[in-house]
Image: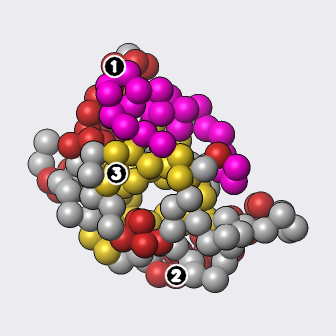
Amino acid sequence: MTNGRRMMLSLLIAISAGITLHAQGTLADYQRGNDLQAKAQDPQAWSVLLDHNGHLAEGIGSNIFLVRDGEVLTPCSEFVLPGISRETVIELCGELGIPCREADLDLYDSGIADEIFMTSTSLCICPVRSIGGRQLPAPLPGPVTKRISDAYAASVDCDFVAQYLKHLT
């Protein structure tokens, strides 16, 4: 697959500084406001929500994972969507022998990540090419993301990358 076609299957992420998820207010209002600010930064960007402590939480209907030094990190489950795809990735990491843990992740962590990917029912697993304007150093997908993505496709018996590419042509 060419890099150009692979780029179509990757995400830009924008994070709106100063907007955090609080116990008060509706999640839907918060998500809409955060998404509007992300789209103002870049019309193609997906937003990532921050919890009330300023830690990475989740995207709209999606979960975020960072890879650093071969270890997969994902936000603590307290403030995130308990997604099936998220849980599947955590289980696959265990099966593949890839260290994976929940952690309080902040913007600094996203800035030093080797790879970042998002999961959701519709995306399955999608690599992130940029977060907050910073291009990620790894090829798309990065080696850890690719291992997990291949295992995910095998576990659900569906080549979701090929399926997406079919609809792009």
Q: What residue type is labelled 2?
A: Ala
Q: Farthest residue toward the left? A: 2
Task: Check disc 2: other Cα within 10 Å, few if <14, some if 14-19, many if 20+.
Answer: few
Q: Is 93 left, or right, of 4 in this rendering?
A: right
Which quadrant of the figure has residue 124?
top left
Element type at mark 3: strand
Question: Mark 3 or mark 2: which is in front?
Answer: 3
Assess whether mark 2 and mark 3 are in contact (beta carbons under 8 angstroms).
no
Q: Residue under label 2, please give it.
A: 40
Closer to the N terminus: mark 3 or mark 1? Answer: 3
Residue situated in front as seen by the camera: 121 or 113: 113
Q: Can residue 86 be seen here?
A: yes
The label on residue 67 is 3
Q: How far apart are marks 3 and 2 (CA)?
A: 27 Å
The label on residue 49 is none
Task: Check disc 1: other Cα within 10 Å, few if <14, some if 14-19, many if 20+.
Answer: few
Q: What stretch is highlighted in magenta?
A: 78-101
Element type at mark 1: helix
Question: Mark 2 or mark 1: which is in front?
Answer: 1
Q: Residue under label 1, please give it.
A: 154
- Residue 49 image position (x, y, % from top left): 61, 65
Q: How far apart are marks 2 and 1 (CA)?
A: 37 Å
* Residue 156 falls inside the magenta stretch: no
Q: Which amino acid does label 1 sit on?
A: Ala
* Residue 90 falls inside the magenta stretch: yes
Q: Which residue is drawn at 26% across and 52% down?
A: 69
Q: In this view, does 60 lie above or below 92?
A: below
Q: Can residue 162 be seen here?
A: no
Assess whether mark 1 and mark 2 are in contact (beta carbons under 8 angstroms).
no
Task: Check disc 3: other Cα within 10 Å, few if <14, some if 14-19, many if 20+.
Answer: many
